[in-house]
Amino acid sequence: MHTIIKNACLNMAKDGFEGFYDSLADQLVPNLPTTYRSFIHRTDGATLPLTSVNDALFFSLAYDKGHYLTFSRVLKDRLIFSEEDTVINLIDYGCGQGTATLATLDFIAKSCNPKSTKLNIHLIEQSSIALEIAVYKITARSKQLGFKISLNTQNCFFSEVTLPEFSNNYDTIHLMSYVLDIKSVQEEILTITDQIKDFPGKNFIVATDINKTEGKRGFNLLSIQLTAKKTPIKEYYLPHHRYNICQKSFGTHIADAIGFLLEVDNSISLDLAA
Ligand SMILES: C[S@@+](CC[C@H](N)C(=O)[O-])C[C@H]1O[C@@H](n2cnc3c(N)ncnc32)[C@H](O)[C@@H]1O
């Protein structure tokens, strides 16, 4: 793994996600690997799958803190875990470098004892470079927190996804962090929603995104496909300190975001059949 990511993960053991970000910024800012203009051009505004480690590092510096914060806040608002949750299934769609899963691990660790909680984690991502970094970070964080995990990946487009068989009846949390605004994702999402509708057990779909028309369109599409109606979307304005890649300076930035939670409960039909 790239030395910058390794060092940042070591710092995460001490100071959590803040520690990860601070170390990343300390190492990267003195020698930025690319410019804002060329990054935005190459990645179509940070939506295309990343094709180099330098772009992955730059993406992290620019967006990870806001994405982590937003996902953590929506989880806190909408989901409750307890000591009784001994096995939890997680699927992260378009996981990028794993930020939403990291926020979820940290959140679960606040309510459950990691030592007696098993997490089945499945990561879906088109960029193999981002996926490799995600696996490294999530494995490191799970160890640091003391979770037992099983981790699997699918390196593919959403249109090619086959959801995993966890072979259990435990709850599954489906994570969609800053993916639903993307046009190709909206075009391919039916492949995923068709499978979630039949996915065993209780399903909780947690989504976050940019507070713009495209984000809200993606949320409405997902909600209508899964529940046949629109679900209220909550707006979030979350100030945080981070590096601004455009202005090349540290400062306070507002994550202007949206979030919601959908539930698809397939445990009822299973109970009736039994
Ligand atoms: C803005 S990033 C968000 C990454 C991560 N979820 C986060 O919150 O930091 C969008 C991600 O979606 C992935 N992606 C974009 N289009 C995709 C598609 N059609 N199928 C699968 N993944 C896609 C990209 O590779 C990228 O990692």
Image (tube, helix red, strand yellow):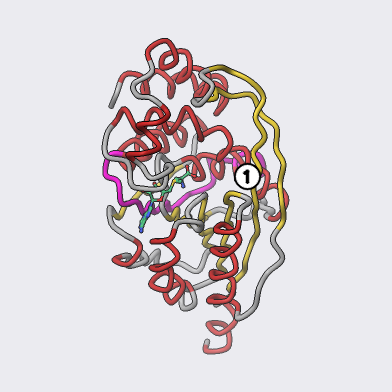
Task: Say what secondary structure mark 1 lies in.
Answer: loop
Q: Is residue 77 left or right of residue 216?
A: right
**Residue 110 lies within the magenta run:** yes
Q: Nearer the viewer, residue 81 or 74?
A: 74
- Residue 39: x and y in percent read 37, 33
Q: Which residues are magenta?
A: 109-129
Residue drawn at (55%, 40%) of the image = 67
The correct choice, above or below, for 233 with respect to 253 in the image is below
Q: Is residue 241 left or right of residue 154?
A: right
Front position in the image: 10 or 131: 131
Residue at point 56% right, 45% down? 104
What's the residue at 54%, 63% (across, down)? 218
Residue 37: say if magenta. Answer: no
x and y percentages locating residue 179 in the rendered image: 47, 54
- Looking at the rendered structure, the kind of residue marked 1 is Cys
Q: How many other residues sit within 10 Å of disc 1, few (<14), some (14-19) or many (≥20)?
A: some
- Kindly identify which residue carries mark 1: 112
- Rendered view: 217 above or below 134: below
Q: Is residue 248 left or right of residue 2?
A: right
Which residue is drawn at the image coordinates 36% and 22% (left, top)?
A: 6
Q: Quadrant of residue 15?
A: top right
Q: Residue 132's x, y, as percent?
A: 30, 39
Residue 32 placed where, x, y %? 38, 18
